[in-house]
Image (cartoon, rainbow, N blue to C red):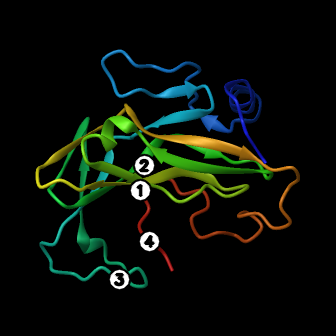
Amino acid sequence: MSIMPDSWIRQMAQERGMIEPFVESQKREGVISFGLSSYGYDARVAEEFKLFTNVNSASVDPKAFSDESFVERRGPVCVIPPNSFVLARTVEYFRVPRDVLVICLGKSTYARCGIIVNVTPLEPEWEGYVTLEFSNTTPLPARIYANEGGCQFIFLKADRACEVSYADRAGKYMRQLGVTLPRL
């Protein structure tokens, strides 16, 4: 298994639509960086947010998740309350090749502010907008910026394709279009 370089990521994005829209070079001036890097792709956060709230006193249950636990917001900035989190999505739509596994890592700019991003791996042949979770681990409100970098995706290419892909299994998060809540 190999980590794939910028030239491979560019080729797959341009020829096979692996990342759309695709930003060919890293944009940094005045923004949290996004776009193609040496061995990854820094995806942007869309202007669509679901803020976690305890206003309705609903319990958090991954088997019966209530959308009452979230307040929807749109805009260029999202403020996460202290010790809470927000769900967002990428601006980019991803199409993962059958012989590739994609790992997501947080941006150091956010991590240094106590904001942690979590995304599970993008499995072979998964496609869609990626739902991102930003946790504010601080006792203060924290800001997330839309249309700027939110996380970095690393592409790991296997020596051979898997026997059963996410698409073959008809995965429950296949082709998600917006911020997607937990499903059973």
Identify residue for label 1.
179
Q: Nearer the viewer, residue 82 or 59?
A: 82
Residue at mark 4:
182
Q: CA distance from mark 1 to mark 4?
A: 10 Å
Label 3 vs label 1, nearer the camera: 3
* Distance of label 4 from label 3 (alpha carbons): 9 Å
User: In what element is the residue under mark 3?
Assistant: loop
Q: Are marks 1 and 2 in contact (CB under 8 Å)?
A: yes
Q: Earlier in the sequence, mark 4 or mark 3?
A: 3
Q: Amino acid at mark 2?
A: Arg
Disc 3 to disc 1, C-alpha distance: 18 Å
* Residue at 49% in and 46% down: 105
Give me the C-alpha separation between circle 1 and circle 2.
5 Å
Q: Which residue corresponds to mark 3?
A: 61
When the figure is inspected, residue 62 is found, relative to residue 4, above or below; the finding is: below
Q: Earlier in the sequence, mark 4 or mark 2?
A: 2
Q: What residue do we see at 25% from left, 83% from top? A: 59
The answer to whether marks 3 and 2 mark residues whose Cβ atoms lie closer than 8 Å is: no
Q: Is residue 140 left or right of residue 154?
A: left
| Position of residue 84 measured from the top left corner of the image (x, y, whole percent) | 21, 61
Q: Nearer the viewer, mark 3 or mark 2?
A: 3
* Quadrant in which residue 94 is drawn: top right
| SS under mark 4 | loop
Kind of residue at badge 1: Val
Nearer-N-terminus badge (3/2): 3
Q: Position of residue 28 (x, y in %)?
A: 40, 19
Amino acid type at circle 4 is Pro
Within 10 Å of the Cα at label 1, are there few (<14), some (14-19), or many (20+) other Cα atoms?
A: some
